[in-house]
Image (spheres, grey):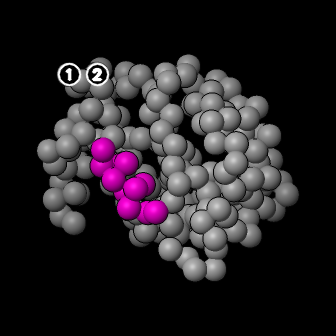
């Protein structure tokens, strides 16, 4: 816990679990990707374990919205008193709790924080409370890219290079699941 920031000032992690997981089943998966077992427990549980271990407030958005933008807007609506948000797709089971805290801490002076792993953009993307109205207006499949672009135009986006493959290692196919299993075993 960062002693200089009161708990009320911490952003809320929005765990987005509304997707249909069609690529996973198309690759041969027999269950929804979030329920697929990774090292003996569901993918979603790995993600939630990291979120819980971070100590940050969180919200699970799993109502089955039609697109990423709709999911983000619904999650922001469900957390009206949040000081900001970390948008975390639920299919990132290798993300570390210290990564979540690092993005939260970097968010303080910036409207948006984008984590990078070896130059590749990842999640969670952090948004401060100044982005609330823009996030609430999201809809469809595009996600929060328009918010990031608007904040970039105001020089209010920071990139945070992290040594955590978990920010880019999502589970979309059975091959992804097998790769995650190997990476998890190597930790």
Is 126 situated above or below 149? below
Mark before the other along the chain sequence, 1 or 2: 2
Q: Secondary structure at mark 2?
A: helix
Residue at 67% from the left image edge and 51% from the top image edge: 82
- Residue 158 seen in this snapshot: no
Q: Is residue 160 above or below residue 62?
A: below
- Left/right of residue 3 with respect to residue 130 in the rendered view: left
> Is 48 within the magenta?
yes
Vertical placement of residue 49 versus 25, above or below: below
Residue 80 in sight here: yes
Q: Quadrant of residue 155?
A: bottom right
Residue at the far right in the pictured view: 154
In the picture, the disc for residue 30 is 1
- Magenta residues (range): 45-55
Residue 105 vertical position relative to residue 94 in the rendered view, above or below: below
Classify mark 1: residues with Cα within 10 Å, few (<14), some (14-19) or many (20+): few
């Amino acid at each position: 816990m960062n002693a200089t920031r009161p708990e009320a000032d911490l952003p809320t992690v929005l765990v987005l679990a509304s997707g249909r997981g069609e690529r996973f089943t198309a690759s041969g998966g027999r269950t929804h990707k979030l329920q697929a077992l990774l090292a003996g427990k569901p993918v979603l549980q790995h993600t939630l374990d990291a979120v819980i271990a971070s100590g940050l407030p969180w919200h699970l958005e799993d109502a089955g919205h039609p697109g990423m933008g709709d999911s983000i807007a619904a999650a922001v609506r469900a957390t009206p008193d949040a000081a900001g948000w970390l948008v975390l797709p639920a299919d990132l089971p290798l993300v570390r709790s210290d990564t979540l805290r690092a993005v939260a801490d970097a968010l303080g002076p910036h409207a948006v924080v984008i984590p990078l792993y070896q130059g590749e953009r990842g999640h969670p993307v952090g948004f401060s409370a100044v982005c609330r109205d823009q996030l609430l207006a999201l809809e469809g499949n595009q996600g929060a890219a328009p918010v990031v672009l608007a904040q970039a135009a105001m020089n209010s986006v920071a990139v945070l290079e992290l040594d955590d493959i978990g920010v880019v290692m999502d589970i979309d196919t059975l091959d992804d699941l097998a790769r995650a299993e190997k990476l998890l075993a190597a930790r």
